[in-house]
Image (cartoon, rainbow, N blue to C red):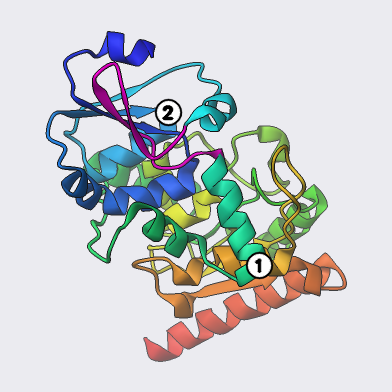
C-alpha cells in the first residue's frame, strides 16, 4: 500500500470506501469506534474529497489525507475483513462491497434497515457526535439566501447514484410550479446538464450545502446519501424512492424495499414528523407527486403561520 509509505509514522490506518451517506453516519460514531479499537496514533485515509469536508465538520483536527485516483470498486472487492494487519500496521476498512451486498440482501429478505446493519457490523451503540459548521460556511449561506434566493426558496437535489433517476421533465415542472408560487429554487447538482429550468445553482462544499439548506422552506430530492447529510436540519424534507437497478455484483432492489431499508426517518437526530417519503412506483404518474408535494408544503406553511 503506497499510503503506508507516504504516511509511515502512524500505527493505525482508517480507510474509507463508502459514499457520503454511510460516511456521514460513520462520523457520528467514529470517536466510539476509535475507543473500541484502542487507537491512538492513527490517520484517516479518504478516497473522495467530500470525505475530507464532512469529516472536518465532526473532527477538524484529526490527521487525515485524501488519496487521488483510487479504483474504489476494485479495492472494495479485495478487502478481506473490517480490520487486518499489513506490514506490521493495523488497517481498518469499515465497509466493503461484500458488506453492501449483504445489507441489500438483508433488506430484501428481512426488511432490515441499513443504519442498524452498520451499527451491528461495527458494534456501535447510541453514543453519537453531532457535526458543527464553520462561521465561513454560515456567512456564505446567509448571503446566498438573502441576495440570490430572496429569503424564500426550495432546495432540490435531483441526482442519485443508487436509485433509478426521475425524468428531467419532472424536475422542470416541479421548479416551474414553485416559481409560479413565488419561490426561488436552488438546485444542488454535480452535473449542470441535470439543472432544471427555473433553478439556480452554484458550486458548494458539502458543509456549505448543508448550511444553505437550513434556510430553505423545504428540501426535495431523490433518496441519496446527500439527503442524509441534510436530514438533521429540521426543515421539511421530501424524499423520493425508486428501484435500485441491477449493478455489477448487486441485484435489483424494488422501491418498497428501498424505502423500508433506507428510510431517513430511522436515522439519528432527525425530526421524523418533518420527513415525507414517497415510493414513486405507487403513483400513476409523476404529476400526482408534484401536486401532493405542493399541497403538503402549502399546508405546512399555513400551519406555521397559525402556530406563529
Residue, x 76% and y 49% (percent of image)?
245
Q: CA distance from mark 2 to mark 1?
A: 34 Å
**Residue closest to the eye, 253 or 291:** 253
- Secondary structure of residue under mark 2: helix
Look at the image and tell me in which quarter the N terminus lies: top left
For label 2, the crowd category at 10 Å Cα-Cα, with few meaning under 14, some 14 to 19 and many 20 or more, is some
Farthest residue to the left: give it. 40
**Residue closest to the eye, 227 or 9:** 9
Q: Is residue 97 left or right of residue 251?
A: left
N-terminal-most mark, 2 or 1: 2
Q: Is residue 13 left or right of residue 99?
A: left
Which quadrant of the figure has residue 88? top left
Numbered circle sitting on residue 20: none
- Residue tagged by mark 1? 109
On the image, the x and y values in percent for residue 284 come to 87, 73
Q: Is residue 73 above or below residue 244?
A: above
Residue, x 35% and y 52% (percent of image)?
122
Which residues fall within the magenta stretch? Answer: 80-97
**Residue closest to the eye, 186 or 261:** 261
For label 1, the crowd category at 10 Å Cα-Cα, with few meaning under 14, some 14 to 19 and many 20 or more, is few
On the image, the x and y values in percent for residue 270 come to 39, 69
**Residue closest to the eye, 123 or 264:** 123
Q: Is residue 93 above or below residue 126?
A: above
Which quadrant of the figure has residue 90? top left
Farthest residue to the right: give it. 284
Residue, x 52% and y 66% (percent of image)?
113
On the image, the x and y values in percent for residue 30 come to 26, 47
Numbered circle sitting on residue 49: 2
- Secondary structure of residue under mark 1: helix
Look at the image and tell me in which quarter the C terminus lies: bottom left
Q: Is residue 58 visible?
A: yes
Amino acid at each position: 500500500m503506497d499510503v503506508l509509505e507516504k504516511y509511515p509514522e502512524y500505527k493505525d490506518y482508517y480507510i474509507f470506501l463508502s459514499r457520503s451517506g454511510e460516511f456521514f453516519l460513520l462520523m457520528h460514531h467514529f470517536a466510539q469506534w476509535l475507543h473500541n479499537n484502542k487507537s491512538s496514533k492513527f490517520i484517516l485515509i479518504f478516497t473522495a474529497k467530500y470525505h475530507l469536508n464532512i469529516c472536518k465538520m465532526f473532527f477538524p483536527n484529526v490527521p487525515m489525507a485524501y488519496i487521488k485516483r483510487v479504483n474504489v470498486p476494485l479495492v472494495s472487492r479485495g478487502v478481506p475483513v473490517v480490520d487486518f494487519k499489513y506490514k506490521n500496521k493495523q488497517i481498518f476498512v469499515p465497509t466493503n462491497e461484500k458488506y453492501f451486498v449483504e445489507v441489500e440482501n438483508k433488506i430484501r429478505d428481512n426488511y432490515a434497515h441499513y443504519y442498524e446493519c452498520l451499527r451491528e457490523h461495527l458494534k456501535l451503540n447510541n453514543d453519537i457526535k453531532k457535526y458543527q459548521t464553520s462561521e465561513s460556511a454560515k456567512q456564505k449561506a446567509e448571503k446566498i439566501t438573502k441576495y440570490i434566493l430572496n429569503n424564500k426558496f426550495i432546495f432540490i437535489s435531483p441526482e442519485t447514484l443508487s436509485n433509478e433517476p426521475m425524468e428531467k421533465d419532472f424536475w422542470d415542472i416541479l421548479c416551474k410550479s414553485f416559481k409560479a408560487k413565488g419561490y426561488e429554487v436552488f438546485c444542488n447538482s454535480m452535473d449542470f446538464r441535470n439543472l432544471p429550468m427555473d433553478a439556480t445553482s452554484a458550486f458548494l462544499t458539502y458543509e456549505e450545502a448543508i448550511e444553505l439548506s437550513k434556510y430553505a422552506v423545504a428540501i426535495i430530492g431523490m433518496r441519496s446519501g446527500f439527503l442524509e447529510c441534510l436530514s438533521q436540519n429540521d426543515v421539511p424534507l421530501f424524499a423520493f424512492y425508486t428501484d435500485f437497478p441491477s449493478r455489477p455484483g448487486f441485484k435489483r432492489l424494488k422501491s418498497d424495499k428501498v424505502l423500508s431499508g433506507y428510510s431517513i426517518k430511522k436515522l439519528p437526530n432527525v425530526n421524523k414528523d418533518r420527513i415525507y417519503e414517497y415510493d414513486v412506483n405507487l403513483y400513476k404518474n409523476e404529476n400526482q407527486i408534484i401536486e401532493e408535494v405542493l399541497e403538503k408544503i402549502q399546508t405546512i406553511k399555513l400551519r406555521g403561520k397559525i402556530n406563529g
